[in-house]
Image: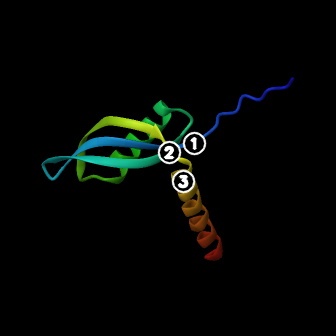
Amino acid sequence: MNYKNELITVWYHAIYMVTENGARREYPIYTQGNSEIDAAVRAAVSITESNSSVSNVTFKSIRIASYHEADTLDAELDAIAEEENKNE
């Protein structure tokens, strides 16, 4: 048999605790990754790079997104790509 070493990317839902305007709050985020660790790192980087008003980003939990969540996220990405193709 011929096996390929392919990584499968799936959607994850991660929750972080962040400090924003002096208060701690939960910061939920969906991200894709090849593993929980990969997804957690990608999410943390995304939070810190895209939102300068938050600090003290602390991991709380992560889970694989449900089929419904993943389908919804994929549909949103497809719609964005379709809109971008129309504008080119």
Q: Residue at x 37, y 40 (%)?
A: 44
Q: Looking at the rendering, in which quadrant would you find the C terminus?
A: bottom right
In the rendered image, residue 33, in percent from the top left (x then y), is placed at 53, 39
Local packing at callout 3 (Cα closer than 10 Å; few below 14, some 14-19, many 20+) is: few
Residue position marked by numbered label 1 in the rendering? 10
- Asked which secondary structure carries label 3, the reply is helix
Amino acid identity at mark 1: Val
Identified by mark 2, the residue type is Ala
Q: Is residue 81 above or below residue 34?
A: below
Q: Say how the picture is coloured.
A: rainbow
Q: Nearer the viewer, mark 2 or mark 1?
A: 2
Instruction: Mark 2 or mark 1: name the one nearer the start of the chain.
Output: 1
Residues marked 3 and 2 touching at CB (< 8 Å):
no
From the image, state whether disc 3 or disc 1 is nearer to you: 3
How many other residues sit within 10 Å of disc 1, few (<14), some (14-19) or many (≥20)? some
Q: Quadrant of the N terminus?
A: top right
Report x, y in % for residue 57: 28, 40
**Callout 2 touching callout 1 (CB < 8 Å):** yes
Mark 3–mark 2 distance (CA, rounded to whole Å): 8 Å
What is the distance, in whole Å, between disc 3 and disc 1 at their CAs?
A: 13 Å
Residue beneath disc 3: 68
Q: Which mark sits nearer the N-terminus, 3 or 1?
A: 1
Q: 55 or 7: nearer the eye? A: 7
Q: Please give the residue where the numbered disc 2 appears in the rendered image.
A: 65
Residue 75 figure quarter:
bottom right
Q: Position of residue 16 (x, y in %)?
A: 31, 41
* Residue ID at (79%, 26%): 3
